[in-house]
Every structure is written in structure tokens, then in C-alpha cells.
Image: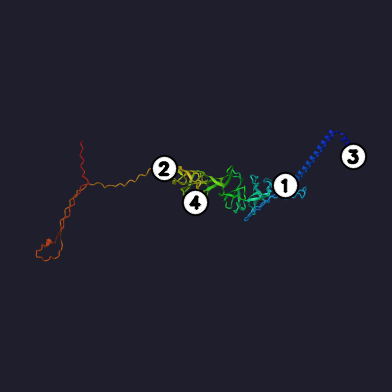
Amino acid sequence: MSARRAGLAARCAGLSGSDRVTAGLWLALALSLAVVAAGALAHSGSRSARRAGRTAAAPAAIAPPAEASAGTAPAVAGSIVAAAEAAPAAAATPASSAPAPWLQAPLSADAVPDTAIAPAGATLVRRVNLAAVDGRPDTIVAYWQTVAAGGCAQPRIVVFRPDAGGQWAAVWDASAGQNGNAPLVPASCDAAVGLFAVRPLDASGTPFLVFSATGADGSQRVIAQALDDPAHAPSVVLPVAAAAQISLADGLPGSLQIETSLTAPDGAGLAELRGEAIGRTDDLFRWQDGGFALSSRNLTLNCLAGSVLDMTTSANGLAIAFRCPAGPGSAVTAIEVTPATQIAPNLLIGGLRTGDDISVSLLPPGPDAAPGGLPVAAQVSSQSAAARQAASRSAPAPAPAAPHAVVAPPATSPQPRQPVAAPVPTITNVAAPAAEDNSQPAPSAAVANTTIEPPARPIPLQPVSAATARPIPQQGR
């Protein structure tokens, strides 16, 4: 080894000045390459250590909110713990070393597994992940069902978010009272969820959770919950009739289409209907000013023509029930005739009879129309009733009865009437009181006590009512 060094020293001494400069440059370049190689090797070792630590880390988990039970408010606390706290450290990592920085960062919504959201034994029905935008953190909206003790399925809708420390927690629960109000979806076997959607309802882009819930009495409600700050934003609730069909249309603003079966009200007085459906109501609600407002309403009857079943007076006019043309056992429907209804010419609406044909059209319901009332007819016509009434008007009046004939007695020849002789005056003696003694001589007793009665007037001869028949003169031959 010393001989080699001595030989190299002798060679360097024999080199010229320029050769010595060149050799120095080559030596400096070699040293630089050695330093770069050492740095690359050290960096590669650090990355390998990180990969080993990442492989050894376990997935994060959510502690789901406690299940709600009847009469008990469900707990909404839950969190995701960091992977370094959930799983033991890798063997290659010293126990005293701190966890890598990426382990302390919060997981995104997409990275949270389904098993970390719904409790054990629950069925996850729907899940929607919302990415962080405009200061709103990542959000998970989950809808699952659990089997209660009675075997029924109980729905649950929960909204999860990470807190400032990166731990995920339930921030809104439909089965818990919000801001002192009753639960929107009570923990009951009678509760049910129909419509479920997460989407914006206006041009602001704020996402909303929109769902329908059915109560124990069959009534329904549509709930819209803003997701920008669900813990403090109030819920918008729209009552809906039982058994109504609800759908959320595409586009902005958000529109709810609600189809409801239309039945005649109990006060209509139409016994033939027996509570049967007479048509349907289609309502359109649009999102405006932070709520759903009625935009339009359409009424559709089971049919617009048929045969009259029943009629009765109503508060606004006349209620008419009729059967659709399919015959007995087919659908029935009803309308109301009001002063706004146009009656066909030559038709007396009050003269309709059971079995008469009828054809109608409907007036569009106004915004102030009473819900559940009979549809108002725009036009009513009946060919059979109009023909019958026209025939009764054109029939001639019956002739008056002829008076009884008076039969005159047969004519007879008049007989001349004989004059009646005047009666002879009669003298009646009347007893008189005794005369007083006067100085003058009294008249004769026969004259003083005699009363003269005038004779009755003779009856004049009556004129002959018929002249004596004249003889027929003989004709010349």
C-alpha cells in the first residue's frame, strides 16, 4: 500500500503544471458526484419509511350516534378518531416518534367507509357526500333503517361533519328535536320516509336535504333543511294530504309535484258516491322566498260524461253526481253547478232526471278555492233532458170540455087565456063601541059599521108566445 502511494506521489511530481490543474478538477468533480449520491440515498430511505408507516395505518372509523328509542331523545355525538389513535404503530416506527403529519389531517367525505356511518345491524339506504366549498366543510347525509324490537323498520336521517379538530360528528338528526321542536321523523314503527333528495333549490347553490315523512295518522309532510348550517337553520315543513304522491322535479327553482285523490266532501249530500274517489288534484309548489308556495292546481275528473245518478242543492248551487260510461260498477264523479256555469240552450238544469245523459267541462280552480270542495262546472249539457223538455213545451194544449146541451120541451099550440072576472066587493061588519049621547042625530047603524074593500085588479091577457101556424097554400099543377 505504501509502495502504491509512493508511486502516485512520484507520478504527480513528474506532471507538469497544466496536468496538475486538470487532475484537480477531475478530483473535485468526483467528490461532488459522491455528495449528490449520498443525498439521494438518504431521501429515498425517508420516502420508504413513510410508505411503510402509511401501509401500517388502519382506516378511520366514525362512532355512530346512539340509536333512538321511543320516548328517548337520540344522541347525536360521534367522531372519527385519527388513524394513529385507532391502530397500533407500525413495528418499523419507533414508539417514541410522533405520528406523521398526514395522519392528523381530517378525512374527506369520500374516504369515510359506510361501516363507520350506520350502526351495526342497520341497512344504509342512501348516502350523499358533499365536498367542501366556499367555507362549507365536507358533509355526509346518511339515511338508514334499523329493525326495532317489534320487527318493523325505523328510518333515521343524520348529517355528519368534521369539527375544527378534524373529528367527524353528527350535527343534525331528523329523529331528534331541533331547536326545541318535536322530531321530524319520530322513532316509531308507523314512521316512514318517502321522498329523499339532496340538491340546491335556488340559484344560490346552497344544498338542501328534501324528504317526506309519514306520521302515525297517515298524514305526510315535506321537509326542506338547508345544509350550509344545519345545526342552526330552521326546517321548512309543508303539510301534505295522506296517501299523496310526491315528486321533486328537476331544474331551478325547485318544484314539488303533489298528486292527491279527490273525493266528494261529506257535506255534499250525494249519497250515491259513498266516499268514492271522483278524480285527482295535481298541485305544483315552487321554491320562493325560503319556502314552497302553490304555483298551480289542476283538477281531473274520472270522466267528463256519463249518466245522472243523484242531484241535490248545495251552498253555491246544485251538486250533480254521475256515473262514467263504462256502466254499473264503473267509476263515478261529481260537479257543482253555480251561477258561473254556462247551461246549454233549451235545458232546464233543475229538470234533469236520474239516467239522463250529461256532459260537462270544468272551470280552473282559483287560488282561494276551498280544498276538498266539488269541482265547479264551466258548461253542462244533456241531450236527452233537452229533447224531453222541448217536446213538453211544443205539445198543443188540450181543448176545453164542451158545455152540456139544454134540451127544450116540444112546442105546443098556445091556448088563449080567458079573462078573469073581477071579484065582487064584500062587506064586513065590525062591532063598534057604543056611541055617546050627542045632541046631533047619529047616522044609520048599517052605514056607520060598514068597511068597503076595493076589488082586485084584473090580470091582463099575456101575449101569445107563438103565432098560430099558417096553412100552406096549394101549388098549381
Identity of the residue furthest to the front in this view: 17
Residue 117 appears left or right of 247: right
Query: At label 2, which amino acid type do we have?
Result: Ala
Q: Which one is earlier in the sequence, the residue at label 4 or at label 2?
A: 4
Q: Secondary structure at mark 4?
A: helix
Q: Which one is earlier in the sequence, the residue at label 1 or at label 3?
A: 3
- Write down the residue under mark 4: 267
Q: Secondary structure at mark 2?
A: helix
Query: At label 3, which amino acid type do we have?
Result: Ser
Residue 303 appears left or right of 209: left
Alpha carbon separation for disc pair 1 and 3: 54 Å
Quadrant of residue 28 within the rendered picture: top right
Q: Residue at x 41, y 42 (%)?
A: 391
- Write down the residue under mark 2: 391
- Write down the residue under mark 3: 2
- Residue contact between numbered discs 1 and 4, judged by CB atoms under 8 Å: no
- Write down the residue under mark 1: 101
Report crowding for label 2: few under 14, some 14 to 19, many 20 or more residues within 10 A (C-alpha).
Answer: few
Residue 238 appears left or right of 406: right
Q: Which one is earlier in the sequence, the residue at label 2 or at label 1?
A: 1
